[in-house]
Amino acid sequence: MARFSDFLGRRVQLHYRAGSNAVPATGVLVGDSGRAVFLEESFAQHSGVKQFRWEIPYQCITKVEDDDPMVDAAPAAD
């Protein structure tokens, strides 16, 4: 069962362990295999768009949170 499927397609800030270091990563959660999550980040470089995708195993993840809190905000009352 995918633990982070609620975050699919959303921009998240994820904290994970890499060796003895705590590392933050920000990107769009594009996949959840049930064993790892996949983040993707796009950026412009030399008049082109590049994409970077990385896999982070569940056992390394310490925290996942929305990077854009306005996405879940309730609409303003009129």
Image (tube, grey):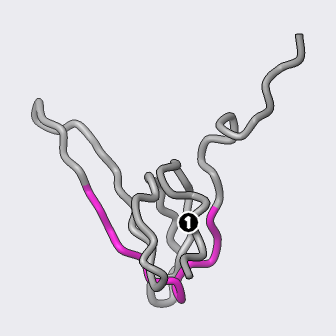
Vertical side of 11 occupied by 31: above or below: below
**Residues drawn in magenta:** 52-64
Please provide percent x and percent y for residue 8.
Answer: 50, 57
Q: Quadrant of the C terminus?
A: top right
Kind of residue at badge 1? Ser
- Give the residue number, with chain letter if any, for mark 1: 5
Magenta part, dominant SS: strand
Left or right of residue 18: residue 14:
right
Left or right of residue 45: residue 53:
right
Please provide percent x and percent y for residue 60.
Answer: 52, 84
The residue under the point 46% across, 58% down is: 29
Could you say whether the residue bearing mark 1 is in a helix, strand or loop?
Answer: helix
Left or right of residue 73: residue 48:
left
- Nearer to us in this view, 74 or 25: 74
Please provide percent x and percent y for residue 65.
Answer: 65, 58
Vertical side of 12 occupied by 31: above or below: below
The residue under the point 36% across, 74% down is: 55
Counting labels gives 1
Q: Residue furthest front?
A: 1
Q: Residue furthest top?
A: 78
Q: How many residues crowd around disc 1 within 10 Å: few (fewer than 14), some, or many (20 or more)?
A: some
The residue under the point 22% across, 36% down is: 44
Please provide percent x and percent y for residue 39.
Answer: 40, 62
Judge whether residue 57 is colored magenta: yes
Vertical side of 63 occupied by 46: above or below: above
- Nearer to us in this view, 17 or 10: 10
Q: Quadrant of the N terminus?
A: bottom right
Judge whether residue 66 is colored magenta: no
Instruction: Quadrant for residue 6, please give it.
Output: bottom right
Left or right of residue 18: residue 3:
right
